[in-house]
Amino acid sequence: MDTIASLFSFITTPVSWVIVQFHTVYGALFGPDTGWAWGLSIVSLVILIRICLIPLFVKQIKATRAMQTLQPEMKKIQERYKNDKQRQSEEMMKLYKETGTNPLSSCLPILAQSPFFFALYHVLNGIASGDTIGVINKSLLESAQNAHIFGAPLAAKFTDNAAKAESLGASITDVRVVTAIMIVLMSASQFYTQRQLMTKNVDTSVKTPFMQQQKMLMYVFPVMFAVFGINFPVGVLVYWLTTNVWTMGQQMYVIRNNPTPGSKAQAAYLERLSKHVTDHGKTRNRREKAIVKAIVTKGRDRNEHERKFINGLNKAGLAAQADGTVVKGESQAVVQTEDGTVTTTAATAKRQQPKRQSKSQRQSGATKAAGETEPNQSTPPSLSKSDEPEDAKPAAKKGDAKSGAGGRSKAQSGQRKGPQRPKSPSKK
């Protein structure tokens, strides 16, 4: 434990100081030796840390989405260089460098709060062993040892024996019941957070090994929390349960208001946005304008949900602009009637297809058109061959009959010229 104290001494003192400051405030409300004062001090510490980690959380979201976008390219590299691991790693690093993506960015919030977690663990362990840590003096140490959360001491663990629990002023049954409930809630919140991410905020059109890894982590993390949780003091369980609940709520907000493109969450968000824009004829804030602008900029690269959103606006007579605003489409115009009321009507009528006519109607129309043009002809009609007298026609020659017969013989395809050889009777 001395090694841990030396490693995290730079953070142990600030953590203990923050806890003492919150304890001063809550102690004035609930009493300095109550579990509410010390428990709420730990919860407030978690909230303060997570607020400071919001910029890292934003980077985590961007990194996760960038990794999801690169999954098809990564899969191609893995298949191309599946027999050369070194070349595969080089191509992966080249892809990360070209796109500006860092796979470790998705782990930044966890890595950033790890020092605070170990510092808090060391502070609570010192309270359990009766050692002063940081700015916690003897009087605060005695106050923390007397504090109980639902009957369990702040520094008690699930693995403690009955003698250790009695020395802290509690029974082993109360300690194990409270710690077991906290461990279950901690694991369940972690599982729900990961499941919510996989079922609602993942592009379902992309099937890669990364998705399988995320599904595996959905079950591995809760088991890890359950295994390690039995060795955590009650105060650390309060810390970890609070940070899990914060992560779950923060992720729910992000999924609802800024979902991943192509996910089920995006379909639900665009449906709500389409309903609002159709009712009010405009977007509400900059965030909605930025989303509409991104959809318009994609053009033909829009996914199914984005195309459905644009088509819904067009059907409602609205058009999304390149700057993210929504205006009335060109198919509508404002018309003022005789009584002074203003109505919105279609500016351009729909193009009507001509009705299909029957054959008799088309022939009668052609005959009628031909009859109308005869009186308008100013020049006399020319003399055709049928108008010539019959005696003016030359008499037909005898050879014409032969030529006609020859023409009929030529018309029969598949026969040779000249006399045909008689067919011999078939031999049976």
Image (tube, rainbow, N blue to C red):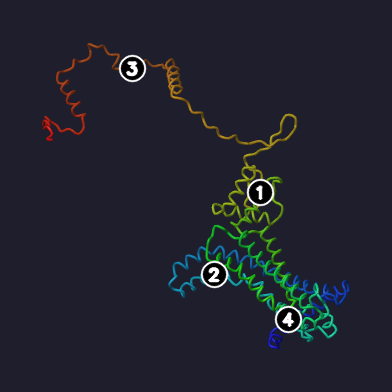
Query: Between disc 4 and disc 2, whose residue precedes?
Result: 2
Residue tagged 3: 382
Q: Nearer the viewer, residue 130 or 347?
A: 130
Q: Nearer the viewer, mark 1 or mark 4?
A: 4
At label 4, the amino acid type is: Asp
Query: Between disc 1 and disc 3, whose residue precedes?
Result: 1
Residue tagged 2: 96
Residue tagged 1: 274
On the picture, is 100 further left or further right than 43? left
Residue tagged 4: 160
**Mark 1 vs mark 3, CA separation in Å:** 71 Å
**Mark 1 vs mark 4, CA separation in Å:** 57 Å
**In which quadrant of the rendered image does the N terminus lie?**
bottom right
Determine the secondary structure under disc 3.
Answer: loop
Q: Residues within 10 Å of mark 3 (few under 14, many from 20)?
A: few
**Mark 4 vs mark 2, CA separation in Å:** 48 Å
- Position of residue 258 measured from the top left corner of the image (x, y, whole percent): 66, 59
At label 3, the amino acid type is: Ser
At label 1, the amino acid type is: Ser
**Mark 3 vs mark 2, CA separation in Å:** 85 Å
In the rendered picture of this protein, how many numbered marks are placed on residues? 4
Q: Nearer the viewer, mark 1 or mark 2?
A: 1
Determine the secondary structure under disc 2.
Answer: helix
**Mark 4 vs mark 3, CA separation in Å:** 123 Å
In the rendered structure, are the residues bearing label 4 and label 3 in contact, judged by CB atoms less than 8 Å apart?
no
Query: Between disc 1 and disc 4, whose residue precedes?
Result: 4
34 relative to 249, above or below: below
Q: Nearer the viewer, residue 296 or 54?
A: 54
Query: Between disc 3 and disc 2, whose residue precedes?
Result: 2
Q: Nearer the viewer, mark 3 or mark 2?
A: 2
Q: Nearer the viewer, residue 386 or 292?
A: 292
Q: Which mark is residue 317?
A: none
